[in-house]
Image (cartoon, rainbow, N blue to C red):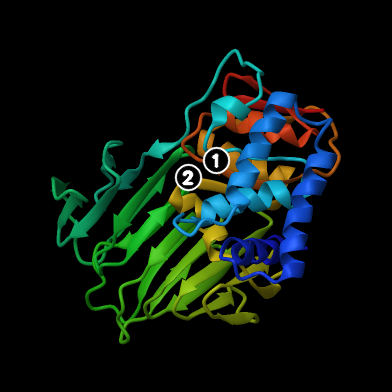
Amino acid sequence: MGYNKANNLIEKYLGNKATLKEKETVESWYINYARNKEDKLPEADYEAVEAEVWSLLEPKSNRNWSWQRIGIAASVALMLSMGIYFYTSRDSKMASKAEYATDIAPGRNRAIIKLANGKQIYLSDVKSGVSIKGKELVYDDGSNIEAIHAKDAEVLTISTPRGGQYNIELPDGTIVTLNAATTLKFPSTFSGASTRVVELDGEGYFKVAKDKAHPFIVSTTKQKVKVLGTHFNITAYADEPATLTTLEEGLVEVRSNNGNKAALLKPNQQSILTASNQITVKEVNVKEELAWKNGLFIFNEENLESTMRKISRWYDVEVYYQDKLPPIAFLGSISRSKSLSTVINLLEKSGGVHFKIEGRRVIVMK
């Protein structure tokens, strides 16, 4: 059973809308979980998981069931074959006892803006965003940084390093949230242009200001996304096997740069552009796809290599594979505010992989 289908069944159970057969199915998941996990968890951990799962599955009319907590219940009670449980609310009780000689803090607000005259400005890490207001560069709290000194529509660049993220409001009012290791190029003004064109390398979430007369275009190395006003996410890292465009609201056209392939996306759909310029479209859980911008890693049957690429970018570490590992898939939710050791301790609960931190390198081994 897929994660989304199982998650929906959990929601029906919690809302007292499940049929008798569906209730029996949900409760059988926990029984199977308890039986199969007995020799994989220490007794103290098992008791903590047991109490947490039952508290999550018990319907209470006055409880506010958040999507994240429902996801935890689904992670524990459903996907037994994954062999992993990401416990996010009480890490100290569930985390592995492994210790590391060094630890690495999570990413934070970090970015650099390169002005039209070549000057670089290192943005404050105690601020979360910056705006282009006329010819002024302003933090999201209203405090000025300095004048842009741009002539006409000169190109400006904002870059986040590995281990950084930042928000920027463009001259037209479009807001972009940049993930780690991302670069966005944009003009200092869109005035006089028939289209609003920006260039993205990395990952960004766009809330495009509506302007029917001036389409907004996001250009990457492999595709162009054309919109009038909408909310969407683009993942276009050079080290990823595909370019992903996920639509939350509105309508977008995705076209490969060779011009032969195009797709029109509706909300809750994602286009996948491969290296061979093939575009496919599928339905997705948008909350999962946008988890990074809401401070979470969410892994939905995600393989080890994909998981470690995300961790590498956010914690600014290199990943070295010491052994040839069997196929491992992860399911669960982890806060991006946790230290690296906490995250990899939780990943180790899969039972099929171990990690070692050496400086800014993570060694993956059996």
Local crowd size for mark 2, using a 10 Å CA cut-off: few (<14), some (14–19), many (≥20): many
Mark 1, secondary structure of its residue:
helix
Q: Residue at x 61, y 48 (%)?
A: 72
Viewed as shown, does residue 214 lie left or right of 82?
left
Q: Image quadrant for the N terminus?
A: bottom right
Q: Is residue 299 visible?
A: no
The three-letter code of the residue at mark 2 reads Ala
Mark 2, secondary structure of its residue:
loop
Quarter of the image for residue 64 reads bottom left
Q: Residue at x 56, y 70 (%)?
A: 223
The mark nearer the N terminus, 2 or 1, is 2
The answer to which of 48 and 111 lies nearer the viewer is: 48
The residue wearing badge 1 is: 313
Q: Image quadrant for the C terminus?
A: top right
Q: Residue at x 66, y 44 (%)?
A: 307
Viewed as shown, does residue 207 lie left or right of 65?
left
Q: Considering only vertical position in the picture, is 150 above or below 117?
A: below
Q: Are marks 2 and 1 in contact (CB under 8 Å)?
A: yes
Local crowd size for mark 1, using a 10 Å CA cut-off: few (<14), some (14–19), many (≥20): some
The answer to which of 183 and 165 lies nearer the viewer is: 165
x, y percent for residue 116: 26, 53
The three-letter code of the residue at mark 1 reads Arg
Identify the residue at the far top of this view.
101
x, y percent for residue 59: 57, 57
The answer to which of 21 and 302 lies nearer the viewer is: 21
The residue wearing badge 2 is: 180
x, y percent for residue 289: 56, 59
Q: Considering only vertical position in the picture, is 283 above or below 167?
A: below
Q: Residue at x 42, y 73 (%)?
A: 217
Identify the residue at the far bottom of this view.
213
Q: Considering only vertical position in the picture, is 47 above or below 24?
A: above
